[in-house]
Image (spheres, helix red, strand yellow):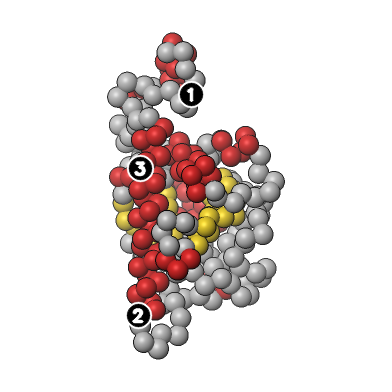
Amino acid sequence: GQGVDEPLSATGFRQADAAGSFLSNVKFTHVFSSDLLRAKQTAAGILGKNRFCKDLEIKYDARLRERKYGVAEGRPLADLKAMAKDAGEQCPSFTPSGGETLDEVRERARDFFEFLCQLAVELEQKEHGKLGAPGRSSGTSGEQFVFPWTNHCSEAEPSSEGGGSSTVLDANILVVSHGAYMRNWIGYFVSDLNCTLPADLTKSQLSSVSPNTGVSHFIIKLENGNLLKPEITCVCLNQDSHL
């Protein structure tokens, strides 16, 4: 949850390093992280291994925090399940006293995603406003947009095999957050925004919580800067081959 702001364990640091090595050839234009310590340390670990953007500023945002679990925070998961059972409910829909509802978490995710879309549109408009600009200032060589997914991939993979030609992106954004929060965000993508999913993705995989440093990749298209109808394609979900 939010109330126990513990650092990563030794295993957590190893996982962050592994994720960093896995993503080392991906050039990010922006990095956002939850402002909780474990997410901050994970984001720093990932960037520390990156070939292109070690010095990129990490922006911390409270909207990316884990779901707030109120009186259950700092206690074993079994206690949360027992509270839910006593209330005649089931996890994860149960809300402990002082905690956030799933709708409240989803609203935070929606608000942050709309902020990202606005950011991307403003970048694109700024780029087009440059007279004689040859292309995106962020750099678009195939090497910089090679994504190392090895399973759960759809045909939406934006770069060709071997680092050849690649899709030109206005922004390539790394977001570091938390398991229950991300499950709600993905649920919002699927139920509210009709996100296209990989054909082989099962319902259990869709509803599961990502492993620590699991990677999910989404391509967002905003036709003509239309913020109301983003076209979202999930390339992979909870990718964990680096672990």
Q: Mark 2 or mark 1, which is nearer the start of the sequence?
A: 1
Would you name the residue on which mark 1 appears? 91
Nearer mark to the viewer, of 1 and 3: 3
Determine which of the numbered discs, if any, sits on residue 108 in the image. 3
Determine which of the numbered discs, if any, sits on residue 129 in the image. 2
Say which residue appears at 62% left-offset and 60% top-offset: 156
Residue 117 appears left or right of 151: left
Q: Disc 1 to disc 3, how far (Cα)?
A: 20 Å
Could you classify mark 3 by the number of other residues whose Cα lies within 10 Å: few (under 14), some (14-19), or many (20 or more)? some
Quarter of the picture containing the N terminus is top left
- SS category of the residue bearing label 1: loop
The residue under label 2 is which amino acid type? Answer: Gly
Say which residue appears at 42% left-offset and 66% top-offset: 225
Could you classify mark 1 by the number of other residues whose Cα lies within 10 Å: few (under 14), some (14-19), or many (20 or more)? few
Cβ–Cβ below 8 Å for labels 1 and 3? no
Cβ–Cβ below 8 Å for labels 3 and 2? no
Instruction: Pick the residue in front: 122 or 14.
Output: 122
Determine which of the numbered discs, if any, sits on residue 80 in the image. none
- SS category of the residue bearing label 2: loop
Where's residue 120, x and y in %? 40, 64
Asked if 152 appears above or below 72 in the picture, the reply is below
Q: Disc 1 to disc 2, how far (Cα)?
A: 49 Å
